[in-house]
Image: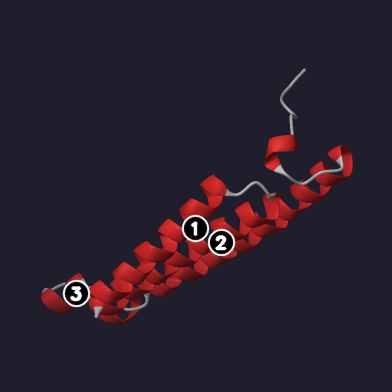
């Protein structure tokens, strides 16, 4: 089952990467980046579900095993929070660029030109 989840995660990541590299519209690029974040979340949760913490393998450790069980989900929540902040910042930048240049396509933007 872990292999299936990782294959689905890899497929989602490749779809997102293709979208980032091939799209011209800024909103499409942002949505493709979100697909890549979701692929990473799926992989984190899958690894968390199907791996055994070290405290279960080595019973002499002083750490309680309960706090290690949800590490993948904890990382996934952090990735979701970072993705939400990225979307807010990205949309603010897109609105500012679209208002300034009256376009939202990457090929028409030339902000770095002097």
Badge 2 vs badge 1, beta-carbon distance below 8 Å: yes
The earlier-in-sequence mark between 3 and 2 is 2
Of circles 3 and 1, which is in front?
1
Q: Residue at x 55, y 67 (%)?
A: 80
User: Whole-Å distance between the Cαs marked 3 and 1?
Assistant: 36 Å
User: Whole-Å distance between the Cαs marked 2 and 1?
Assistant: 8 Å
Instruction: From the image, tell me which residue sits under label 3.
Output: 55
Q: Is residue 103 left or right of residue 44?
A: right
Instruction: From the image, tell me which residue sits under label 1.
Output: 16
Indicate whether 18 appears above or below 34: above
Q: Is residue 109 left or right of residue 57?
A: right
Q: Is residue 11 left or right of residue 26?
A: left
User: Whole-Å distance between the Cαs marked 3 and 2?
Assistant: 34 Å
Q: Residue at x 63, y 63 (%)?
A: 84
Q: Is residue 79 visible?
A: yes
Q: Is residue 63 visible?
A: no
């Amino acid at each position: 089952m872990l292999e299936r989840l990782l294959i689905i995660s890899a497929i989602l990541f490749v779809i997102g990467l293709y979208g980032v590299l091939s799209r011209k519209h800024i909103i499409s690029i942002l949505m493709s980046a979100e697909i890549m974040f979701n692929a990473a979340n799926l992989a984190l949760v899958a690894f968390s579900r199907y791996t055994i913490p070290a405290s279960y393998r080595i019973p002499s450790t002083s750490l309680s095993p309960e706090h290690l069980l949800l590490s993948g989900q904890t990382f996934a929540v952090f990735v979701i929070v970072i993705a939400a902040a990225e979307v807010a910042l990205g949309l603010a930048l897109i609105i500012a660029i679209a208002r300034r240049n009256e376009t939202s396509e990457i090929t028409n933007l030339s902000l770095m030109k002097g």
